Image: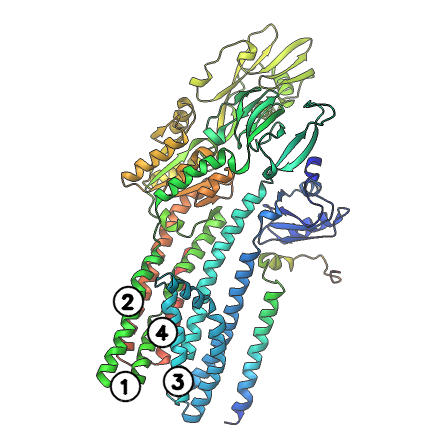
Amino acid sequence: MAEQGAVTAPVGDVILSLPTAHCAVCITDVERALNAVPGVRGARVNLTLRRVTVDAPGLTAGDLIPTLERIGYEAHELDPEALSSTTADRQGRDLLMRIGIAGFAMMNIMILSVAVWSGAETATRDMFHWISAAIALPTIAFAGQPFFASALAALKAGRLGMDVPISLALVLATAISVYETSQSGHHAYFDAAVMLCFFLLVGRYLDHRTRAIARSAAAELTALEVPRATLLRPSAVTGASIADAAEEVVPVASLAAGDLIRIRPGNRIPADGEIVAGRSEIDRALLTGETLPVAAAPGLMLSAGEVNLTGPLVMRVTAAGRDSSLARLTALVEAAESARGRYTSLAERAARAYSPLVHLMALASFAGWVWATGDLRLAVNIAAAVLIITCPCALGLAVPAVATAASGRLFRRGLLIKDGTALERLAQIDTVVFDKTGTLTMGRPWLVSADPLPASLRPVALALARGSAHPLSRALAEALSAETAAVIEDQQEHPGRGSSACWQGREVRLGRADWLGVTDDEAARPGSAAWFSVAGEAPIRLEFADSLRPGARECVARLRADGQRLILLSGDRPAAVAELAATLGIEQFHAGIDPMGKADLIEALAAEGAHVLMVGDGLNDTAALARAHASISPASALDAARVASDMVLTGQDLSPVADALLTARRATARIRENFAISIIYNIVAVPVAIAGFATPLIAALAMSASSITVTLNALRLRR
Amino acid sequence: MEILAILIPVSLGLGGVGLAAFIWALRSRQFEDPKGDAERILSDAWDDRPRPD
């Protein structure tokens, strides 16, 4: 923890993520515990975001996390710089303010309008209209700004978006109402214009909030990894000796080619490079899907994202940051993304068909009435009524209301939707492709059976396993945790080989087959193995299997029951892949596939007309994730994989994937229903408007009734 | 009908007070943690005296 202190700036707040906090007691406990730490000036829990912000100058997350862990709360450090959600916050507050003002104006104008509708005459009516105008004009000018700005942008780009008819309706309705009022006319549309503005702002705000929540949760996942590296500075006086080099903890972003860095066991490798000193084993599962660790010795090339397992290593950086292997994959991802093509969302398709139609209809009724009566004022009035009645109030709410309800439901179940059209694309899925290591399995081994180990040797094996940080040793220690450890002496870790110790004067070893002098056909078997030996006796083989991710079995079973075609893709050995496919009942599997191979396979499936959902976590899945019709990655995935996918699982459980498909199909059905509802309203109301029978009362009724129906229909999803 | 000259300004004024309160709440960031605020009311810390800050 001391090494973190070197880089964390003492100024500013420490932000910790609290994934398990959920109630009033949690808030009180956490705040009380943190306030009791000397040096803490204040702590404030935000339960909505599950975070605590601690004002503690000079203290670091490393000083505070143990305090929270002692009282039973899991806490993770968040990188405050990665949480730059301030602009999104400001936008949200800005929209809320406009909604508040439009709502206030709407209610007041409505009170006045009710009086007019119920028969106010002459001078009273004119006065009410003038008061309405005094409220409506500034409101429209202020609250309508988001629509005017985006309509202007659309017109400049030569398009007719949804916002052009909206702005036209707002401006035309207000202008004609002011004119009518000045001529002491009967009808003024101030109430309709402000109400339109209010409902559309609500739709806009829902849309904004859904995206802001997704963005902030995605930013939180990124902020969880505070990337640091231990830089070695061989001092000029003693020469370039590595042993006595000064150590300094630096942000990964500041690494440059040629730097020497130390990588401790258990740490992720921060950049690409070559091993200069040290022996260890490397876990490449996130990059290749291969579950067997690779022996590492000086000269071996390492890539960013791999994990160092047993011994400390010194590495010379050859490429860091944007030049590393991550960046090389970016080109692959970009190519794949352009191949996916731009998906046209339902809302876009609706807007494309709708905008020209509305304008034509308003224009036609204007021309028709001028031709029939020659009365310009009447014709403009009717054209404004047509624009207001057809205005996409319900259309503007149809998609955001459903998206908010559906993504809120999925978020509570542990699935975060990053992309706006992901739900619609997810609803079309007919083929699900899974990655193996890290997705269906946890990449965490467990001992298949302790039977090969005689009961007399178990305490020895436990003692030996406890002294090592290697994943297989830890799995062995966990499996034997019921035993009492034997007394062993002189335990030594042999990085890249195993560990040895002295027990009752005899040497005992736990490690790789070749180190114990036996040969193992590991590659042909599904699991991985460690060997245990006591000097003078035959070595014992201990077999380990990769544990399934929780919910994997249920998820696969539900998807199969749903009629999805399931495929397992992995870069791992055929034996391991075949075993898992048989366990889960997946019939089609491909082993030993490289990253390009995965993307090509998805491409081939897409060419056959399949809509593929890719679920994967590794760097080797990135191109496939980007190429697939929709993609999901677990929170434990590499940053690059999470960026490439549309949805992220926030917990460990895989079962929300099956839920997501169901919810997505229901959400898309709701969106279509909502479109149908608003079209029906239009079919009924438009002829009335064109015929010239529409009064402000009819406009107000049609608008609020359709908006409320659409919202209620969307809310049915929350159940 | 003269009563309208009093009632309309009164109704607008009352609405305006509500609007001003909403804008004040928005500006003083009272919508940052709706879930936390709902739970905090249940905590019995600071029930006897106000929190010093």
Gap between marks 2 and 1 measured at Cα: 24 Å
Q: Chain of mark 2?
A: A
Residue at 62% x, 48% y is A80
> What's under tag 4, amino acid-wise?
Ile
Q: Secondary structure at mark 3?
A: helix
Residue A145, given in percent of the width and then of the height, sits at 47, 69
Kindly indicate whether the residues beneath marks 3 and 2 are on one polypeptide chain.
yes
Is disc 3 in contact with disc 4, using a CB cutoff of under 8 Å?
A: no
Q: Which mark is residue A388?
A: 4
Kindly indicate whether the residues beneath marks 1 and 4 are on one polypeptide chain.
yes
Badge 2 local density, few (<14 within 10 Å), some, or many (20+)? few
Numbered disc in front, either 1 or 4:
1
Q: Which quadrant: the C terminus of chain A?
A: bottom left
Whether B9 is drawn above or below A518: the answer is below
Residue ID for mark 1: A375
Whether A257 is drawn above or below A647: the answer is above
Q: Chain of mark 1?
A: A
Numbered disc in front, either 3 or 4:
3
Gap between marks 3 and 2 measured at Cα: 27 Å
Residue A464, given in percent of the width and then of the height, sits at 63, 19
> What's under tag 1, amino acid-wise?
Asp
Residue ID for mark 3: A179
Observer-nearest of A445 and A220? A220
Residue ID for mark 2: A357
